[in-house]
Amino acid sequence: MSKAFVRESEADDDEIPAELRVPAGSKNYMTPGGWRKMKAEFAQLVQKERPELTQLINWAASNGDRSENGDYIYGKRRLREIDRRIRFLTKRLELAEVIDPELREATDQIFFSATVTYLREDGRSETVSIVGVDETDMKRHYISWTSPVARALIKAREGDVVVLRTPAGIEELEITDVVYQALETEQSSF
């Protein structure tokens, strides 16, 4: 069958990976830094990468036979990827609810955007920041508010012991510190 009659499904193009899905009926919470980072990626794609790529595709198309033209074939494939990412970012930014941790009232209770320090059962201390699903970064200890650890911590207070249920078993975490502060963001794209 000719490639001309095979069409990629648009539904497959916009499929959101499970780890980035926001629970049904929930808002897409983000920190200000995460929102700015996503907005910057959107601007980069729309204002720079897509226009440059369309110029390359037009040039490649003007060279003649498109069936064996690598610049044209690769360019069209990359353009579909960029357009898919633009659609994804557009949806995410439209649904985003930005919550600034520095504007939160003083509290020792854990909510979205809190930075929490807790003790594990083995005595190790860990610090995590609860962020949006699009901002998760394990190297920086940024965990999604939908993660099992965050769900165990949310609404607890400093000094509480919470139960974390994981596939490996049940563990108790003792909350030692709760802080609301601005989180660092990297300028690299997602």
Image (cartoon, helix red, strand yellow):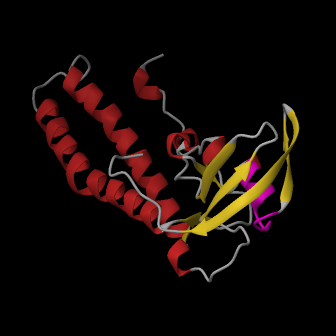
Counting from the top left corner in percent of width and height, residue 158 is at 75, 66
Residue 43 quadrant: bottom left
- Say if 59 sits above or below 34 in the image: above
- Determine if the magenta segment contains residue 131: no
Residue reaching furthest front?
Answer: 123
Q: Nearer the viewer, residue 82 or 107?
A: 107
Res 100 visible: no
Q: Which residues are magenta?
A: 149-159
Q: Nearer the viewer, residue 31 or 121?
A: 121
Q: Is residue 147 left or right of residue 11?
A: right
Q: Is residue 140 left or right of residue 179?
A: left
The count of marks equals: 0
Q: Nearer the viewer, residue 119 or 6?
A: 119
Q: Residue at x 11, y 35 (%)?
A: 59
Q: Residue at x 37, y 51 (%)?
A: 186
Counting from the top left corner in percent of width and height, residue 146 is at 70, 54
Q: Residue at x 71, y 67 (%)?
A: 110
Q: Nearer the viewer, residue 9 or 182?
A: 182
Q: Residue at x 65, y 51 (%)?
A: 21
Counting from the top left corner in percent of width and height, residue 66 is at 22, 24
- Say if 61 sits above or below 116 in the image: above
Q: Is residue 129 left or right of residue 42?
A: right
Counting from the top left corner in percent of width and height, residue 178 is at 66, 65
Res 17 visible: yes
